[in-house]
Amino acid sequence: MKMNTETALKWIAEVFNESPGGITPETNREDIPEWDSLGVLTLMADLDEKFDILLTADQMGAMTKVNDILEVLQQHQKLSPAN
Amino acid sequence: MRAEKFISPDEDYFEDHFPGFPVVPGVLLTEMMGQAAGKSLDAEKVPRGKSMLAKIKSAVFREWVRPGSTVELLAEIKSSRPEFATASCQAKVQGKVVASAELFLTFVPINDFSPAYRDVILEEYLLKHPSSGK
């Protein structure tokens, strides 16, 4: 299943309980209140369940902004190229 | 995983929940389901810590659970990873689903527990079922 960046951002916003238009690829982790330790686990679980992407805690810890999540989706060919 | 819990009519929470209409609080039913899932995960004997309920993804309470009921708790582990697990759980009384929940669990390092801590229920279960777990 591939999705475009807009859909991916909506999914990420849902993971972190943010409003759909509330984040951009440049949004930093510290600006998302629910991107805490539980948020990291929730993201890991969603990546696993929805995309079959399994990351380690270290890989998750290295992510500092939303674009890092998009890059993971890109690397696993889950993100459509930009229009 | 299947577990059972008898709901004693003497439970103190019935006094307030609710006066004249004693029923088991939904949060306690959820905790029971979470603990059933947790025992199932801990029985896997993966060295990742003790399972703890971290998030209630969804919970539905279909029927009241009255004093004197025996609640059957069913937990199906949907995913079990080093850092997290998910479970689909049900609570039944006399074969009827009274509650269900989708739960997200994480693991607390065993060193965070008191040195005297023991999971007696799990130990007894594993003694009787030595082939359980990985």
Image (cartoon, coloured by chain):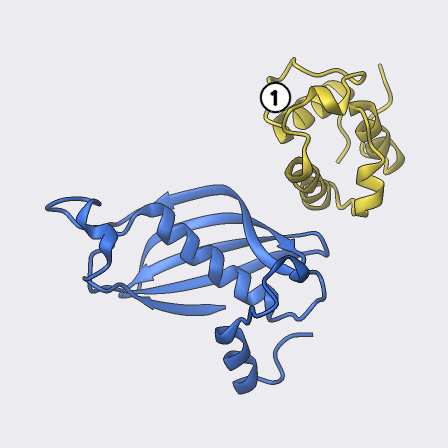
The foreground one among A38 and A14 is A38
Instruction: Name the residue rendered at 60%, 60% in the picture.
Output: B113
Q: Position of residue B97 (x, y in %)?
A: 33, 56
The residue at the point 19 percent across, 62 percent down is B9
Q: Position of residue B31 (x, y in %)?
A: 43, 53
Residue where numbered disc 1 is placed: A18
* Quarter of the image with the C terminus of chain B in it: bottom right
A62 horizontally vs B127: left or right:
right
Which amino acid does the dot numbered 1 rest on? Glu
Count residues near mark 1 (Cα–Cα under 10 Å), then give few for <14, some for 14-19, many for 20+: some
Which hue is chain B drawn in? Answer: blue
For residue B86, side relative to residue B11 (left or right): right
> B89 left or right of B22?
right
Q: Which chain is the one coloured yellow? A: A
Task: Say which residue appears at 69% left-offset and 27% top-offset.
Answer: A12
* Rendered image quadrant of residue B117: bottom right
> Who is closer to the viewer here, B105 or B113?
B113
